[in-house]
Image: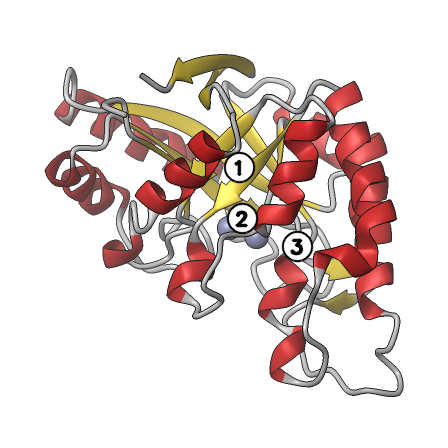
C-alpha cells in the first residue's frame, strides 16, 4: 500500500501526551506516511483527568502551521476521539457545530463513572466485559461519530488482574454492536497499539474483524493510537496485512466526515 495513513494520534492537545504536532508531522514524512489525523481526547465524564484540556483555537492554529509547513508532503486532517458519544450528544453537537473537523472516533473510556483503566478483581468484576460491551452497543446505536475506536480495549486492562479475554465468549453482543455500526454507516478501527502493549494482536481482535467482514462491514480505518513520537505509525503494516487477508477492499480516510476508500493494490 503506498498511501499510508495513521488515523489515531494524540499530541499535547490531549492531556496524556507531550508531543508537539509539528514533531509528529516531521516524523510522519520521514516514515513515508501520506496522511495523518490528530484525534485528540474529548472526554466529558466529570471524573476525567483531561476535562477542559482541549483548546480548539490552539489546536487549529497548529494544524494551520503544519499544513503550511508540510504542504504537498503530508495531508493533515482534524479529528477528535469523542468519549461515550451516546451520553453527550447535546454537548458534542453544541461544541462541534461550527467547527471544521474531518473525523471523529467514538470510544468508550468509562462505564458509568468508572474509568476502564483501573484495578479489577474477581468477585465484583465478573460481569465487567458484558457491562463494557453494553456501553459500546449503546454508543454504536445512538452515538454520533464516524468510526468506533478500539472496540475491545478492555482486554488491555482486565487480564492483568484476572480474566483473559476471548471474543467468542461475547460473540452475540459483539455481533450486535457490529450490525449497528454497519446499519448506521459507521466503521471500526484497527488500532495497532495492542502490539506494543504486548497483546500480540490489534484492537479489536482478529475474530471480531472477521465477523465484521462477514456481516458486510466495509469501513475500516487504521491507527497507532500514538501518545509518544516513536509510536507514530507503529505496526500499521501488521494491521494492513490482516485487513487484506480478511478480504477488506482497502483502508478508509475521511474528509469533512465523508469516507473515502484507499484500495489495496
Ligand atoms: Zn481511547
Ligand atoms: Zn486514543
Q: Is residue 52 left or right of residue 17?
A: right
Tag 2 and tag 1, C-beta contact below 8 Å: yes
State yes or no: Cβ of the residue under disc 2 lies below 8 Å from any atom of ligand 2.
Answer: yes
Q: CA distance from mark 2 to mark 1?
A: 6 Å
- Locate residue 165, reporting x and y percent: 69, 67
**Residue 86 appears in the picture as rendered:** no
Q: Earlier in the sequence, mark 1 or mark 3?
A: 1
Q: Quadrant of the C terminus?
A: top left
**Residue 32 appears in the picture as rendered:** yes
- Locate residue 107, reporting x and y percent: 65, 46
Q: Nearer the viewer, mark 3 or mark 2?
A: 3
Residue 41 marker: 2
Residue 80 marker: 1
The answer to which image quadrant residue 117 occupies is bottom right
Q: Earlier in the sequence, mark 2 or mark 1?
A: 2
* Disc 1 crowd, CA 10 A, few/some/many (<14, 14-19, 20+): many
| Label 3 element class | loop
The answer to which image quadrant residue 125 occupies is bottom right
State yes or no: Cβ of the residue under disc 3 lies below 8 Å from any atom of ligand 1.
Answer: no
> Label 3: which residue?
152
Q: What's the residue at 23%, 44% (across, down)? A: 24
| Label 2 element class | strand
| Label 1 element class | strand
Amino acid at each position: 500500500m503506498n498511501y499510508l495513513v495513521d488515523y489515531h494520534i494524540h499530541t499535547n492537545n490531549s492531556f496524556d501526551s507531550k508531543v508537539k504536532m509539528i514533531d509528529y508531522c516531521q516524523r510522519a514524512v520521514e516514515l513515508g506516511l501520506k496522511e495523518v489525523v490528530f484525534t485528540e481526547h474529548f472526554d466529558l465524564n466529570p471524573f476525567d483527568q483531561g476535562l477542559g484540556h482541549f483548546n480548539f483555537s490552539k489546536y487549529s492554529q497548529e494544524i494551520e502551521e503544519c499544513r503550511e509547513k508540510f504542504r504537498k508532503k503530508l495531508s493533515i486532517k482534524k479529528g477528535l476521539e469523542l468519549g461515550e458519544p451516546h451520553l453527550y450528544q447535546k454537548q458534542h453537537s453544541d461544541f462541534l457545530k461550527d467547527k471544521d473537523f474531518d473525523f471523529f472516533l467514538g470510544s468508550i473510556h468509562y462505564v458509568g463513572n468508572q474509568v476502564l483503566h483501573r484495578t479489577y478483581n474477581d468477585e465484583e468484576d465478573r460481569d465487567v466485559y458484558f457491562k463494557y460491551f453494553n456501553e459500546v452497543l449503546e454508543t454504536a446505536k445512538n452515538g454520533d461519530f464516524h468510526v468506533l475506536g478500539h472496540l475491545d480495549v478492555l482486554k488491555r486492562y482486565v487480564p492483568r488482574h484476572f480474566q483473559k479475554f476471548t471474543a467468542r465468549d461475547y460473540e452475540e453482543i459483539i455481533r450486535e454492536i457490529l450490525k449497528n455500526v454497519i446499519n448506521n454507516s459507521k466503521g471500526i478501527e484497527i488500532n495497532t497499539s495492542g502490539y506494543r502493549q504486548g497483546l500480540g494482536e490489534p484492537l479489536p481482535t482478529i475474530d471480531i474483524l472477521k465477523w465484521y467482514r462477514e456481516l458486510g462491514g466495509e469501513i475500516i480505518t487504521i491507527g497507532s493510537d500514538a501518545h509518544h513520537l516513536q509510536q507514530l505509525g507503529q505496526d500499521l503494516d501488521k494491521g494492513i496485512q490482516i485487513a487484506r487477508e480478511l478480504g477488506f477492499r482497502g483502508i478508509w480516510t475521511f474528509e469533512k466526515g465523508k469516507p473515502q476508500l484507499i484500495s489495496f493494490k
